[in-house]
Image (cartoon, helix red, strand yellow):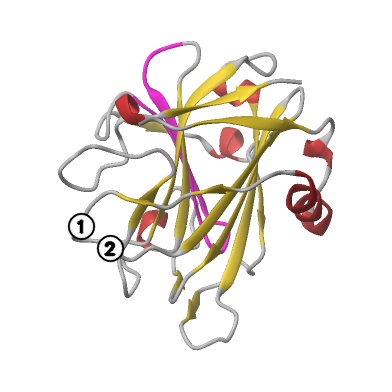
Amino acid sequence: MKKAADAQYIPGIERLSGPDFTDKMLSEVNPQDVACANWKEYPYIPEVTLRIAFSDSHLALLYKVREEHIRGAELEDNGPVWEDSCVETFIKDPVGEGYYNIEVNCIGTRLAAHRLSRTDFELFKPEKLSKIGCIASLPHQITDISDAADKEWMIGELIPFEVLGLDAAPESLEVNFYKCGDKCRQPHFLSWSPIGLPEPNFHCPEFFGKINFIK
């Protein structure tokens, strides 16, 4: 069953940064679980919550993750961030064909593209990618944590609606949210809205859920 949720309206959320953004999202927005382990071959389920908010101009997301192994090896944008401890935001194109995928590893390295399919895509150029705000709780350096007492990290994202081809917040968007770690010690592939496919694949708009934007 496809999931649905309402985003919390927070005017001016895009003007906050660092701890101010994180504190606002944690205190005012109810969490959603990203916990669907759709494939029995990958049973590991890290603790992943997502908070969804919006302003007149931006979609705001805060992922909070607790897992046994935190891997952050990719430092270059548009590299293979999915191999690391990574969160992913997929959004069906609201004005055209295809969908957007925005992927961020635990140290704030980003990948973004517009896709017609898993193999037919165009990566964002640096100028467009720079419009997507990213707030990472970990420093942007190679990271490998498996023995720390507190194995928790957060990623905040501020996605301008203009990047999606919109002038303002829509009534709704078709989306799915993911947590993966292809090269973590326990590979895993979690989704927010469930996926009914025989093997791991996030590039499946037919299984996207929906978020509503209600002021």
62 up-or-down from 125: above or below: below
For image coordinates 43% across by 76% down, the residue present is 69
The image position of residue 123, as x and y in percent, is: 42, 35
State the mark number for residue 43.
2
> Is 161 placed left or right of 4 in the picture?
right
Q: Is residue 192 magenta?
A: no
Q: CA distance from mark 2 to mark 1?
A: 5 Å
- Quadrant containing the C terminus is top right
| Figure quadrant of residue 57 | top right
- Count of marks, rendered view: 2
| Callouts 2 and 1 close, C-beta under 8 Å | yes
State the residue position of label 1.
40
Q: Is residue 165 above or below residue 144?
A: above
Coordinates of residue 93 in the picture (x, y in percent): 46, 19
**Circle 2: residue type:** Pro
User: x%, y% of residue 88?
Assistant: 46, 46
Q: Position of residue 94 (x, y in %)?
A: 50, 15
- Horizontal side, residue 32 vs residue 213: left or right: left
- Give left or right: position of 117 versus 110: left
Say which element carries label 1. Answer: loop
Q: Residues within 10 Å of mark 2 (few under 14, many from 20)?
A: some
Q: Amino acid at mark 1?
A: Lys
- Residue in front for this viewpoint, 76 or 64: 64
For the record, the magenta segment spans 96-115
Residue drawn at x 29%, y 31% is 204
User: In percent of the image, x 35 and y 31: which residue is there?
Assistant: 1
Answer with the quarter of the image where residue 96 lies: top left
Res 160 → quadrant: top right
